[in-house]
Image: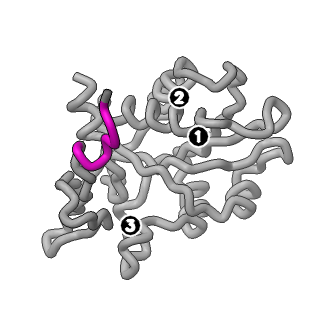
Amino acid sequence: MIYDLIKKNRAVRRFDVSQKISIKQIEKWIELARLSSSARNMQPLKYVISTDEKINGLIFPHLGWAGYLTDWRGPIENERPVAYVALLLDRSIAENSHCDEGIAMQSILLGAVEDGFGGCIIGSVNKSKVARILQLPANLDILYLIALGKPVEEVVIETADGGEIKYWRDENNVHHVPKRPLQEIIFRSF
């Protein structure tokens, strides 16, 4: 059921490095993005997949991991992503992607979660350095990276109390994600 799949699709930042993901598997998830809606049907997104440990090791230092967890520098070496997908805008097709990147990333992550994996959308990327690592031509701009792997952390959704929406980790390293209640986000119904 889609409700359960969306509830299970949390930003996961710690992974089991022994559980690899094949390029074929990731291509299956990107196929979901390809089939998803695209503003004006322009389809300006392109993707780079990396499952290569060396390339992933070069990418990792150029990412920011969890803005609210100010004392956490990201996953330790044996909990890092086993794969990355770079979401790119092909400016030879369109100058902007409108809402396509959100739709595409959600489609990719729902596919990953359905197959027992998870991921995290990373917007804090040193784009120029990662573009050099990925050897991107000038017409391809990095929009986001998706870190992927087999989750080793528990993520719990809770109701935001008093408007506090900052995620946090408890003493057992459980990641808590407050969500505003439905009655707070529906402004009006007619």
Residue 184 magenta-highlighted:
yes
- On the image, which quarter does residue 86 sit in? top right
Q: Amino acid at mark 2?
A: Ile
Q: Is residue 142 magenta?
A: no
Location of residue 185 in the rendering, given as x and y in whole percent from the top left corner: 31, 46
**Disc 2 element:** helix
Disc on the earlier residue, 3 or 1 = 1
Q: Which mark is residue 30?
A: 2
Query: What is the number of the mark on residue 75?
Result: 3
Residue 49: assigned label: 1
Q: Residue flagged by tag 3: what amino acid is it?
A: Pro
Above or below 81: residue 2:
above
Look at the numbered discs 2 and 1 and tell me whether their residues touch, using CB distance below 8 Å.
yes
User: Real-space Cα distance between discs 2 and 3?
Assistant: 25 Å
Question: Residue 62: which quarter of the image?
Answer: bottom right
Q: Among all residues in the image, which is located at the extreme left?
A: 172
Instruction: Estimate the spatial distance between the alpha carbons at disc 3 and disc 1, rounded to whole Å.
Output: 20 Å
Q: Which segment did they paint magenta?
A: 183-189
For image coordinates 55% across by 21% down, the residue present is 37
Residue nearest the observer in this picture, 80 or 18: 80
At horizontal 21% and vertical 31% (from top left) the residue drawn is 4
The secondary element bearing badge 1 is classed as: strand
Q: Residue at x 60, y 55 (%)?
A: 55
The amino acid on which the numbered mark 1 sits, given as a three-letter code, is: Ile
**Residue 135 place in picture, x, y as percent:** 77, 50
